[in-house]
Amino acid sequence: MSRSLVIAKFGGTSVADYAAMANSADVVIANPNVKVVVLSASAGVTNLLVALAEGREYEIRQQHLMKIRTIQDNILNQLPENPQLHQDIDALLANITSLSEAASLATSPALTDELVSHGEIISSRLFVEILKAKGMNSIWFDVRKVMRTDSKFGKATPQIEEIKQLCCAHLKSANFLLPNRETIIVTQGFIGAESSGKTTTLGRGGSDYTAALLGEALDATQIDIWTDVAGIYTTDPRITPTAKRIDEISFAEAAEMATFGAKVLHPATLVPAVRSNIPVFVGSSKAPEKGGTMVYTTNSIKSDLPPFRALALRRKQTLLTLTSLNMLYAQGFLANVFAILAKHNISVDLVTTSEVSIALTIDTTGTNTDGSSLLTQALFEELSTLCHVDVEEDLALIAIIGNNITSTKGVAKEVFGALDDFCIRLCCYGASTHNACFLVKNSDAETIIKLLHQHIFE
Ligand code: ADP
Ligand code: ASP
Ligand code: MG
């Protein structure tokens, strides 16, 4: 009999309250191949924990703590009586209180990660009890035993080989090989641990990435991402209600969408999935009967790969224009600029150049858990030794994602023809056959998305 192992991840809204958790538990129970469950913190909890880690004054801390307690108590109080569970959750909430006191005296990225990890720890603990109350055997597993990362607190990098070895040692029991599942392993997304055992996080929205990393390490046959939308749409259905669900999409297209801002998948999610060729499903935990989107290799896609697949929007873009007359006919200028950016841990996103200037945007995808800016004073000081630096903020990046975009006639007319009334600040086209993208004023972005969607897809 062939072995099936599905990793199911549920996002914040899918574990927001008792009803959402109960729906998610039903989804897990309905598919006997789901043997590992990865959870986010209940919706809103991570934001509150991040705020606590910023070291607020007493009154504000009390308000945040009360809100967290209310969210968790609402779930706890609907579960069957369980004094041990109450005691455990109380102890976790007491930890949050003392860590937030410590943060108010002196905060740090390591302390932030330790504090923020409590969101996922509590939601997963509660979910185990919901499954048990529904008659399903399940155990709580501390993902930090296997999710080894480096020590970049706030946005740690997973150590793939070590994760595989640790998963082998701690999780890959014969259980997975049994066609009949006996116990469901419930664990946390987003958090990990560096080699000395200190808690780290993978950056905001990182639970999708955890699911994919575990999927890869455990040789999963599928990774299911359960969220609040019934799949991946032609654009964010919150912005454009007429957006259509894409039933199947290639890894390459979905990865471009995630990179260019489609929040439905964390940008790194598809990296392990592509590497190990594991199909990814995206669906709604509230309405699983609506189906969802399958993401897999181009070869597995039965329908045509269209030139236009989707539109993505990424806000909060910062454009740096670096100007220097020394650039004219010079060699190595770009290399020097990029070396400074790399030294300051900046990953460049879009680049265009002219004779004496470079315009570039900064990649802020999967931002630091503590929300701190990557653009520091030290960076600007070092760049200004080479060139004059202009900074423009309040921009948004719009990406058109599709296939063979650079070899399809009429793409530019189709896209820019619809945008007569808007200024395009910067445009990148030609580096990838899967996208064309441009920067616009943030205040124009939603109108442009709606207009382009209508023009291209409706
Ligand atoms: P979760 O908490 O489950 O991880 P997220 O809020 O991170 O959920 O992601 C789901 C959200 O992604 C949706 O509510 C939707 O607004 C947004 N989204 C952005 N682009 C798309 C898209 N192309 N298709 C579907 N959802 C999208
Ligand atoms: N709870 C974390 C966040 O809000 C991780 C996640 O939900 O994916 O960013
Ligand atoms: Mg998410």
Image (spheres, helix red, strand yellow):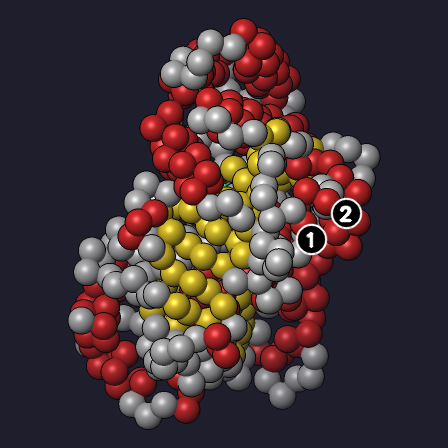
Q: What is the x, y in percent for residue 37?
A: 54, 40
- Callout 1 crowding tier (Cα within 10 Å): few <14, some 14–19, many ≥20: many
Q: Nearer the viewer, residue 426 or 28?
A: 28
Q: Nearer the viewer, residue 262 or 375?
A: 262
Q: Is mark 2 within 8 Å of ligand 2?
A: no
Q: Nearer the viewer, residue 434 or 354?
A: 434
Numbered label attached to residue 217 = 1
Question: Which residue is tagged 2?
Answer: 168
Dividing the picture into quadrants, the one containing residue 203 is: top right
Q: Residue furthest front?
A: 1
Q: What is the x, y in percent for residue 349?
A: 53, 66
Vertical order, 266 against 334 (above or below): above
- Callout 2 crowding tier (Cα within 10 Å): few <14, some 14–19, many ≥20: some
Vertical order, 139 against 440 (above or below): above
**Can residue 370 be seen at all in this image of the molecule?**
yes
- Are discs 2 and 1 less than 8 Å apart at CB? yes
Q: Residue at x 58, y 41 (%)?
A: 181
Q: Amino acid at mark 1?
A: Ala
Q: Secondary structure at mark 1?
A: helix
Tell me which label, 2 or 1, sits earlier in the chain. 2
Q: Secondary structure at mark 2?
A: helix
Judged left or right of residue 176, residue 226 is: left
Q: Quadrant of the C terminus?
A: bottom left
Q: What is the x, y in percent for residue 403?
A: 41, 80
Label 2 – label 1 distance at C-alpha:
8 Å
